[in-house]
Amino acid sequence: MTPPAPQPTPSRSVKAFSLIEVLVAIGIVSFAVVAIVGMLPIALNTARDSMLETDAAVIAQRVFAELQASTGTNRPVSINVNGDTKEIDLSSDGTNYLAFGEACEVRSSPTSEAPITDSGVSFLGVVSVSTNTGIFHLSRVEVSITSPASAQASSRTTNTFVTLMGY
């Protein structure tokens, strides 16, 4: 029987990271984390703006659909679930105001672009009709959706949509 081989003694050349390498790695990782955290507010604002633009497009599409669904010069737009409507005259130039809630439903018909204090109103819609299209019985209908409705007109974000409608 032979005795077991002696275990090698650890040498001084052990493989490891130096303190400088560890500090550089921590610095790079912390720089990346700070950059990512700094981008979060921008990403949140962009997401919020995108949601507002989507809501504005849905509102404008709804208004256009209701105007196109009927015939004649005076076209109704539903204001609330009680069946109230706002008549929009396509045969003469004019401006109409509609207040919309968070679910893109028409809540009321204000008389101006003044800030709306009703807590259920998020958007203000301005429906402008222009008959100066050069074509008989054709009107240019512009729907501008602004938000937030409680802010001054100069402080609101505006999305504008335009179509032509015959009457």
Image (spheres, rainbow, N blue to C red):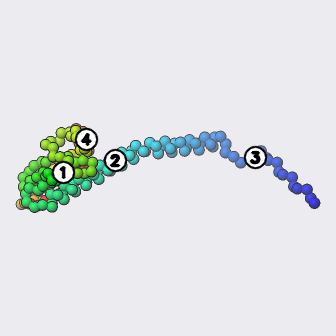
Mark 3 crowdedness (10 Å alpha carbons): few <14, some 14-19, many ≥20: few
Mark carried by residue 119: 4
Instruction: Please tell me whether residue 22 is drawn above or below residue 64 in the rendered image.
Output: above
Query: How far from the left and from the top, in percent, is residue 108?
Result: 17, 46
- Which of the two discs, 4 and 2, labels the residue nearer the N terminus? 2
Residue type at mark 1 is Asn
Between disc 2 and disc 3, the foreground one is 2
Between disc 4 and disc 2, the foreground one is 4
- Which of the two discs, 1 and 2, labels the residue nearer the N terminus? 2
The quarter of the picture where the N terminus appears is bottom right
- Which of the two discs, 1 and 3, labels the residue nearer the N terminus? 3
Residue type at mark 4 is Ser
> Residue at the spot x=25%, y=55% of the render?
58
Mark 1 to mark 3 CA distance (whole Å): 81 Å
Per the image, the residue denoted by label 1 is 80
Towards the viewer: 162 or 19: 162
Mark 4 to mark 2 CA distance (whole Å): 19 Å
Mark 1 to mark 2 CA distance (whole Å): 26 Å
Query: How far from the left and from the top, in percent, is residue 128?
Result: 14, 50
Mark 4 to mark 3 CA distance (whole Å): 72 Å
Per the image, the residue denoted by label 3 is 13
